[in-house]
Image (cartoon, grey):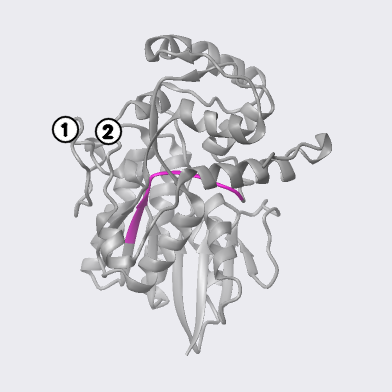
Amino acid sequence: MKQLYIITGAAGHLGNTIIRMLKGREIVIRGLLLPHETGAVQENVFYYHGDVRDKESLRPLLEHTEGYEVSVIHTASIIDISEHVSSKIYEVNVKGTKNIVELCGEYQVKRLLYVSSVHAIPEGEPDSVLHEISSFVPSQVEGGYAKTKAEATQIVLDAVKKGLNAVVVHPSGILGPYDSSGNHLVQLVKDYIAGRLPACVHGGYDFVDVRDIANGCLLALEKGRTGECYILSNRHYEIKDILGMVRKIHGGRRLPVLPMWMAKASVPLMQLYAKLKKERPLYTKYSLYTLKSNDRFSHDKATAELGYRPRDLRQTIKDTVNWVCQHTNKKSGLAAKG
């Protein structure tokens, strides 16, 4: 039987990377774009416009699939580094996922792959190794984004108990090429290259290549056990070390490293500056909290069951710098060295 893959969030960093990885396979690919989206469109992909908040707008995406085995990869969400749950984030991340789950059941798709987040997993004790869990409670995690991902993940797992064939992945901090959607970590690299980053902060997180996450999603879709969750992580990297890699590849000045107390004190000023510039702030109270949180995520389960293996982040940084220089700074003629 012919294979049909449906990817929501097709213009997003992960969504469009998954589509890149699927190209060349003998399958049909459908991608969901927001009504206003036109960027990141790839050849030989059937794009549909809709909004995960509007269930009826999603039906064309799943119709006329007779003779196909249909797999849905649900990447669409709003990644937000603010503290609170806004109504829009809740509607997209939670209600949108509920709509996708219900339609997958209604149209009898073969399998759903839901892209959750490591933020949906409670931190546990400091320095404890974090593994997959089987139930998710929003009140046990910090930050609006984390709470919505926890609630949405539980919706998927509850649907599995009612017969839905679904599997969940939890990516850590995604970085890498092919981004045109405003990934915060890619923005950090862009700002450093452009000389717009005055300082970095003392702290770090588990950062992983978007291509490894995309591959992990496809592996989980094909090999993952129904109702199981898989952490797709790498390892901890300090922000100053990330920028050090960028400097070694592209050049640039060594930035002062702000202690966390100073960075936190500067948050209101940085947010005001970003608002005046009509930009998103890179550092918020929640993002700074994340940079000091427990990020000892274990991907042992994904490695053992799926064959997931993340690459060294130095290659990720090199490819990200090249991508940024080629696509964001064409007019300035910038190019990565080496």
Q: Is residue 205 left or right of residue 9?
A: left
Residue 258 position within the rendered picture, expressed as x and y whole percent measured from the top left = 46, 13
Residue at x 44% of width, y 38% of height: 87
| Amino acid residing under circle 2 | Asn
Is residue 187 something that shows in the picture?
Answer: yes
Specify whether residue 175 is painted magenta: yes
In the drawing, does residue 134 fall left or right of residue 50?
Answer: left
| Segment colored magenta | 168-177
The one nearer the camera, 198 or 62, is 198
- Quarter of image, res 141: top left
Q: Residue 332's image quarter?
A: top right
Real-space Cα distance between discs 2 and 1?
A: 8 Å
- Amino acid carrying label 1: it is Glu
Residue plotted at (41% across, 76% down): 109
In the picture of the structure, the residue carrying the numbered disc 1 is: 125
Residue 337 at x, y = what percent?
69, 39
Residue 32 x/y as whole percent = 57, 61
When the figure is inspected, residue 102 is found, relative to residue 141, above or below; the finding is below
Q: Are marks 2 and 1 in contact (CB under 8 Å)?
A: yes
Residue 305 lies in the magenta-colored region: no
Q: Which of marks 1 and 2 precedes in the sequence?
A: 1
Q: Secondary structure at mark 1?
A: loop
Instruction: Check disc 2 and report its element: helix, strand or loop.
Output: loop
- Of 94 and 127, nearer the camera is 127
Q: Which mark is residue 216?
A: none
Within-10-Å neighbours for mark 2: few <14, some 14–19, many 20+? many
Picture coordinates of residue 124 (x, y %)? 18, 36
Q: Is residue 84 visible?
A: no
